[in-house]
Image (tube, rainbow, N blue to C red):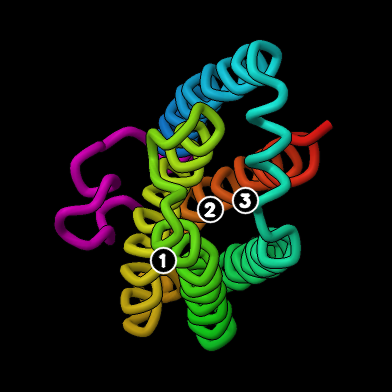
Amino acid sequence: MFNHKNAPDGTFFNFHKEPPLVAYEFFKLGMWIFLATEVLFFGGLFAAYFILKYKWPEVFAAGSAYLDVKLGATNTVVLLASSLTMALAVDAAQRKNKGKLTLMLGATFLGACGFLVIKGMEWYPKLTSGKLPGSDVFFSVYYMTTGLHLIHVLIGMYYIALMFFRSRTGRYTDEGASHAGVEVGGLYWHLVDVIWIFLFPLLYLLGGH
């Protein structure tokens, strides 16, 4: 069992002196509470989408038809693949497999980079052709929702990169080390994937119907 006395300075388990199992559960509980607030936040955006779509169906139909479904679908596959590699990273951390953990975190980061590149390929022609935020109600919703999601992707990338470099030092796999950081990072990244799984059909598939 993990001993908090062996925790590196500046970590959760170094500041909290509860029994290790209790501290570990509190750590995960905190992330679950945070994720719940994120679900409520995006739930409000989804509700706004349906209200606005009901009021301006023609605008949403025209805007949705303008989107590139192939790029959106490709980004969905990329994020799902990165979710798989993140799950494998969590499994590797739990099994104290340093090499696999580092490899899977690196693969997850590359998947996130791929998502950014594809999103840039999608946004650029729209922005240069005058489809800007505020040009109509559909593209206001489109840029707000996908932009907020993109911010979450960037935050996730920062934490994945942090875990990657820490994993190379054995932070999560050495004797007495805790893999809790990888687990909560995985929870956050799965949330990023789930949000996009809802955004893709709403914006690209259902907007015109």
184 to 17, vertically: above or below: below
Q: Which residue is mark 3?
A: 193
Q: Amino acid at mark 3?
A: Asp
* 166 vs 178, nearest the viewer: 166
Residue 105: tell me if it is visible: no
Q: Position of residue 160 (x, y in %)?
A: 41, 66
* 196 vs 122, nearest the viewer: 122
35 to 200, vertically: above or below: above
* 198 vs 167, nearest the viewer: 198
In whole angstroms, how far apart are the C-alphas of marks 3 and 1?
A: 14 Å
Asked which quadrant contains residue 157, the reply is bottom left
101 to 66, vertically: above or below: below
Assess whether residue 20 is covered by the magenta stretch.
Answer: yes
In whole angstroms, how far apart are the C-alphas of marks 1 and 2?
A: 9 Å
Q: Which residue is mark 2?
A: 189
Q: Earlier in the sequence, mark 1 or mark 2?
A: 1
Q: Residue at x 84, y 31 (%)?
A: 209
For the magenta stretch, what is the residue range?
1-24
